[in-house]
Amino acid sequence: MSDLTDMAIDKKATLTYVQLMKEDLAVFRLVPEDGVIPDYDAGQFITVGMPIPSEDNKLIRRAYSMASHPENKEFIELVIRWVRKPLPGRVTTALFNAGEGDEVSWIPPTGVALKISEKLADGSKDERRIVCVSGGTGIAPFMSFARHLHAIGDHREIINLHGSSYVDELSYKDELTALDQESLDRGSDKWNFKYRASISRPQEWFNRSWTGQTGRVEQFLKPENGAKSPLEELVGEKITPQNTIFYVCGWQGTVDGVLNYVRPLGFLLEKEKEKAKDGNYSVKFESYG
């Protein structure tokens, strides 16, 4: 998401938690100055502002998807990658140089690109399988999805597919694995959740322990030898727009990769729903870069 410099009403918040997972990947938690977490929808983003010393402390803003969920009224959580090439982002650099107790500016949650579909075109409840596909920190809105749907006891089948270059970039692997295990323990009639990850550079030494899926995350959607895709093997049936809705977040290449596999199956973007016989869209996405 790009820098936001339009006029807006900024609020104050404090960084209360910073977990550095590697030098360029971290989880940040912030608490508003008044302690009040506003109502929002899973999949939305907030805008964070930081003064930039090299620009006379001019306040620069940037949007970040939230990994926290609406039921959490204690803090807002972000997972952020510090991309330094070709040029590092100004706000992200300032955040990585900040520490617990530091003040930030923020603008309350907004965004509709990844809001969860709750109703079909005919007004009935949308009970299709939810498949979330993300690369890198694109996992953030889908952590919000998982936490939210778990908190409200949603019974839809939820598949979370996450891809990264390295094992230590699977930001929420432990929590997502626990949610997957809970589904096995409780039964899918009570909580139906599956998590799978893919590593795109399995040949590198740092990834030597990885035994799961390899390649880009959209490889989960690629039919193997003309048969079922790994995703279809996982869910036990053919994927169709009538039984599945896709949510995608990551680099544009990830979005395009997913669309290349699902468009031939009849999946349509939200803006294309008028083309569907039943009036329903079956893909929502948000991309960066």
Image (spheres, helix red, strand yellow):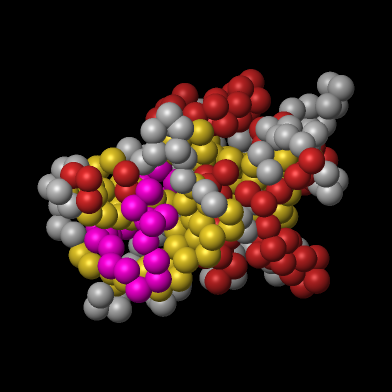
Q: Position of residue 14 (x, y in %)?
A: 32, 71
Location of the N terminus (image quadrant): top left
User: Where 275 sits versus 85, above or below?
Assistant: above
Residue 45 located within the stretch drawn in magenta = no
Residue sitting nearer the eye, 199 or 98 = 98
Residue 40, image quadrant: bottom left
Residue 112 located within the stretch drawn in magenta = yes
Residue at x 68% of width, y 43% of height: 166
Q: Position of residue 26 (x, y in %)?
A: 51, 57
User: Where 118 sits versus 215, above or below?
Assistant: below
Residue at x 77% of width, y 36% of height: 204
Residue 22, image quadrant: bottom right
Residue 96, image quadrant: bottom left
Horizontal relation, residue 43 to residue 216: left or right: left
Residue sitting nearer the eye, 49 or 267 = 49
Q: Which residues are magenta?
A: 92-117
Horizontal relation, residue 39 to residue 114: left or right: left
Q: Can you see residue 142?
A: no
Residue sitting nearer the eye, 70 or 98 = 98
